[in-house]
């Protein structure tokens, strides 16, 4: 192995210590063959020439250069300014270096070539990997340039660099790339622009290309550039000239980006095969402006299209878009003899769901899967905007509330309170406006959700059955109950609920199963049971002293005190889970419960996921209440029956009763007290300690769960006995809500219900005699 030649280093006096230290490190790099450095005192900078061995193949090394002119030892200019070592040195190649390489910064021929070493900041690269990280990148760049490997056709065509330019243009890439067909052509599109002052005293332009094509008609042409000015910042409208080549014109050689005036722009258009059509439009613009004098400088955007031999990196199109800006002042000369300056602009993709998904690390949209947001307050608005930023915004938003002063404490919209007047606007409209700006315009419902759901056919309109889901972010029990009504549940999409419990201490998310089994009501009842079983969560949810903050005098409006950051942390996590489900689909069987709490350090979150199997549904007559038994309770009952073969057994049913949907939601059972009696002919529920145990359930659940009634089993398939009827009457007389008596039989569940009448007696639901069954 040949010994590496000694590095020749010549460093003049007065080189700053930090630069001297960097040069010593560079001298030790295996690719460095020499360094000549001197300090330029008037400019307070160090100019260094670093000679890099490019590791060419032996036959090229023998003659001293590659076929495309990369030298065996390349002299590279490093300029260490007074910002070093905080800022990376400026790196340039010799002036006669071949400029047809990709990954060169766009500079005119008056400037030495500058390599683009990293997708991002060279300063950040140096800060993370040191000065030798820059040398590694530079040596690798030169090796690939010599081997013509800076572009890999299998990876895609590298777009022409547009780093460090002051002007920007945005457009719908898909729309523009559909313009080129068989023949060459050109088109004019409307634009809107924003002008910002630069440190040099000029203006930089941000130009947005509209989807609307236009013509260069002579009538009031100058009025297109009308402006609204505020200080040094102004905005207006204009036009963009788009030119493309015919199908046969392939630009397969990487050419330097050296456009700096109209002659070089025309030369670039000739290279791409679209010069004639561009020339016609430039002449027409010049003619229209002949008699005009614009009050402020306006941008004329020119976009040339180049057809590359392969698709651009990360796209499915070989069409490259190259934008340029010409400043217009009125009476502009854009003729062939004009040398008017032209600036490079950076091309950016306009806002779209595809762009937002790619920026979020998601796959591009296959189509917008519709979903509905009910509740556009603090939680709902944050989830909606998180989803929209991932290209998955809601297609319908519903809320009758208006934006009030207190909403600005936690609402996701970056709105400022109105200084005068009282028209705050509705939450749904304000949110829809923000979503429309992100190219995801939703339908708006400014109505009371419960009243809307009760209207004929409203459920299907709010969330059709074939939609992804309805997100209920209202935290309103009335909305949850209305969504669970039988006629509504049959025609709507599945419900996902998101809210915060315990004054923002616990985040909650539930996902209904297919066919609303488990339903949103089943899930919240199960959540109450889980909350009650966890001492820490129980304390937060049911015993939190969530003081209400009054927001008005003589009105019922109130809110909970909670920092916006705390709410945002929970909303962001829920949004991430919702986006994952929007991408991958809701559970095929059963539903889910998720709830999160703050970690002990007060920073992190701990989320608990509880899959929920479908409930066991027990139906009676058409007018009878329904019974929905959680899968867990069904298992506990079956285990208890199996544990006492040949004898009847039973216990107490725990859960909730919805008087809106006429439904018992059974989520737990209490075991029989020790003084209970079990025999082949009957089960007698004991009383020892039972009252205290039921009171404990009610206390731990904050009154959200209570005893619904009892259960027992029959050894043969049969309906309620006379004893069952008598017991139901006795229990109903002692409580306000209906009593449920559930009977497990070998042929399925049977039940009866009873409740106190308005008089002194009790009432047995007549459908119980029809033997309600699974």
Image (cartoon, rainbow, N blue to C red):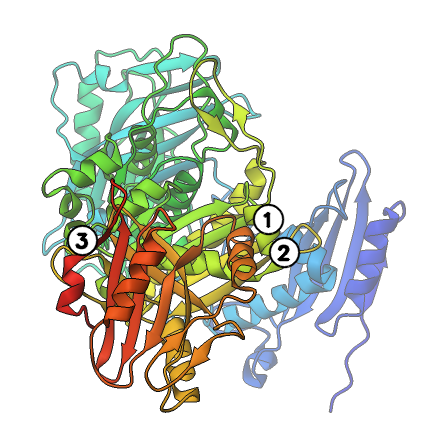
Quadrant where the N terminus sits is bottom right
Q: Please provide percent x and percent y for residue 717.
A: 21, 82
At 73% from the left and 69% from the top, the residue drawn is 32
Figure check: 431 above or below 144: above
Instruction: Give the image location of residue 339, x and y in percent.
Output: 35, 30
Observer able to see residue 755: yes
Residues at marks 3 and 1 touching, judged by CB atoms closer than 8 Å: no
95 and 741: which is toward the camera: 741
Q: CA distance from mark 3 to mark 2?
A: 36 Å
Q: CA distance from mark 3 to mark 1?
A: 33 Å
- Residue of label 2: 536
Q: Is residue 589 left or right of residue 697?
A: left
Question: Whole-Å distance between the Cαs marked 1 and 2?
Answer: 6 Å
Which residue corresponds to the image point at 34% horizontal and 10% vertical from the top-left?
A: 295
For the C terminus, the image quarter is: bottom left
Query: Which residue is label 1 attached to?
Result: 540
**Label 3 packing within 10 angstroms: few (<14), some (14-19), many (20+):** few
Answer with left or right where residue 248 lies relative to residue 328. Answer: left
Among the 4 quarters of the image, the one containing residue 186: top left
Question: Quick check: 41 above or below 645?
Answer: above
Dots 1, 2 in contact, CB < 8 A: yes
Image location (x, y in percent) of residue 651: 42, 71
**618 vs 649, nearest the viewer:** 649
Asked if one can make out residue 159 in the rendered structure from this viewpoint, the answer is no
Determine the residue positioned at 58% across, 32% down: 547
In the foreground, 645 or 282:
645
**Residue drawn at the location 30% of the way across and 33% of the way down:** 399
Identify the mark at residue 486; answer none if there is no mark. Answer: 3
How many other residues sit within 10 Å of disc 1, few (<14), some (14-19) or many (≥20)? Answer: many
Label whose residue precedes the other's in the sequence (3 or 1): 3
**Location of residue 488 in the rendering, given as x and y in whole percent from the top left corner:** 17, 50
Q: Secondary structure at mark 3?
A: helix
């Amino acid at each position: 192995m040949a010994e590496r030649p000694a590095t020749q280093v010549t460093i003049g006096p007065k080189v700053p210590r930090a630069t001297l230290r960097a040069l010593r490190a560079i001298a030790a790099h295996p690719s460095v063959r020499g360094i000549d450095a001197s300090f330029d005192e008037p400019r307070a900078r160090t100019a260094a020439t670093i000679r890099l061995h490019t590791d060419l193949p032996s036959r090229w090394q023998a003659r001293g250069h590659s076929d495309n002119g990369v030298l065996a030892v390349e002299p590279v200019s490093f300029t260490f300014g007074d910002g070093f070592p905080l800022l990376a040195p400026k790196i340039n190649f010799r002036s006669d270096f071949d400029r047809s390489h990709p990954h060169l910064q766009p500079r005119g021929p008056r400037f030495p070539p500058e390599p683009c070493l990293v997708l991002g900041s060279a300063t950040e690269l140096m800060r993370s990997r040191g000065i030798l990280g820059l040398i590694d990148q530079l040596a690798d760049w030169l090796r690939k340039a010599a081997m013509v490997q800076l572009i890999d056709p299998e990876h895609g065509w590298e777009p022409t660099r547009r780093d460090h330019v002051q002007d920007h243009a945005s457009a719908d890439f898909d729309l523009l790339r559909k313009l080129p067909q068989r023949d060459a052509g050109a088109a004019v599109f409307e634009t809107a622009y924003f002008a910002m002052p630069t440190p040099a005293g000029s203006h930089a332009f941000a130009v947005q290309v509209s989807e609307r094509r236009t013509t260069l008609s002579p009538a009031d042409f100058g009025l297109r550039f009308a402006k609204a000015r505020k200080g040094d910042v102004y905005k207006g409208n204009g036009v963009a000239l788009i030119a493309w080549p015919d199908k046969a014109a392939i630009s397969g050689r990487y050419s330097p980006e050296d456009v700096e005036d109209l002659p070089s722009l025309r030369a670039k258009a000739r290279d791409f095969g679209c010069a004639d059509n561009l020339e016609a439009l430039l002449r027409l613009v010049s003619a229209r402006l002949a008699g005009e004098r614009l009050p402020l400088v306006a941008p004329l955007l020119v976009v040339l299209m180049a057809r590359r031999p392969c698709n651009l990196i990360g796209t499915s199109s070989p069409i490259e878009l190259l934008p340029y800006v010409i400043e217009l002042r009125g009476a502009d000369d854009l003729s062939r003899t004009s040398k008017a300056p032209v600036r490079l602009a950076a091309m950016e993709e306009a806002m779209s769901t595809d762009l937002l998904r790619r920026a979020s690390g998601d796959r591009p949209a296959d189509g917008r899967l519709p979903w509905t947001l009910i509740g556009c307050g603090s939680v709902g608005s944050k989830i909606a905007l998180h989803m929209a930023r991932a290209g998955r915004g809601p297609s319908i938003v519903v809320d009758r509330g208006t934006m009030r002063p207190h909403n600005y404490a936690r609402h996701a919209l970056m709105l400022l309170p109105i200084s005068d007047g009282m028209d705050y606007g509705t939450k749904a409209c304000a949110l829809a406006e923000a979503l429309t700006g992100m190219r995801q315009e939703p339908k708006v419902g400014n109505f009371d959700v419960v009243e809307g759901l009760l209207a004929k056919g409203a459920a299907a309109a709010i969330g059709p059955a074939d939609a992804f889901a309805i997100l209920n972010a209202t935290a309103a029990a009335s909305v949850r109950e209305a969504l669970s009504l039988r006629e509504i549940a049959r025609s709507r999409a599945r419900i996902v609920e998101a809210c915060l419990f315990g004054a923002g201490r616990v985040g909650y998310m539930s996902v209904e199963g297919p066919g609303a089994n488990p339903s949103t009501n089943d899930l919240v009842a199960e959540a109450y049971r889980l909350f009650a079983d966890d001492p820490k969560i129980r304390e937060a949810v049911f015993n939190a002293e969530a003081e209400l903050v009054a927001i008005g005098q003589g009105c019922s409006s109130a809110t909970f005190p909670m920092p916006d950051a705390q709410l945002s942390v929970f909303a962001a996590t829920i949004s991430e889970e919702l986006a994952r489900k929007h991408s991958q689909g809701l559970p095929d069987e059963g539903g889910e419960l998720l709830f999160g709490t703050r970690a002990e350090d007060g920073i992190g979150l701990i989320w608990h996921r509880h899959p929920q199997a479908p409930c066991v549904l027990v139906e009676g007559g058409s007018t009878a209440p329904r019974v929905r038994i959680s899968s867990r309770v069904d298992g506990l009952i079956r285990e208890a029956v199996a544990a006492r073969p040949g004898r009847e057994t039973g216990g107490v049913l725990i859960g909730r009763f919805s008087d809106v949907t006429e439904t018992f939601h059974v989520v737990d059972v209490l075991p029989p007290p020790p003084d209970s009696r079990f025999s082949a002919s009957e089960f007698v529920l004991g009383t020892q300690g039972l009252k205290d145990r039921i009171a404990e359930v009610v206390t731990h659940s904050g009154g959200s769960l209570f005893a619904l009634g009892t259960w027992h089993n029959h050894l043969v398939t049969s309906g309620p006995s006379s004893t069952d009827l008598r017991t139901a009457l006795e229990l109903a007389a002692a409580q306000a809500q209906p009593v449920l008596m559930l009977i497990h039989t070998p042929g399925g569940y049977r039940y009866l219900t009873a409740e106190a009448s308005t008089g002194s007696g009790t009432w047995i639901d007549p459908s119980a005699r029809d033997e309600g069954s699974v």
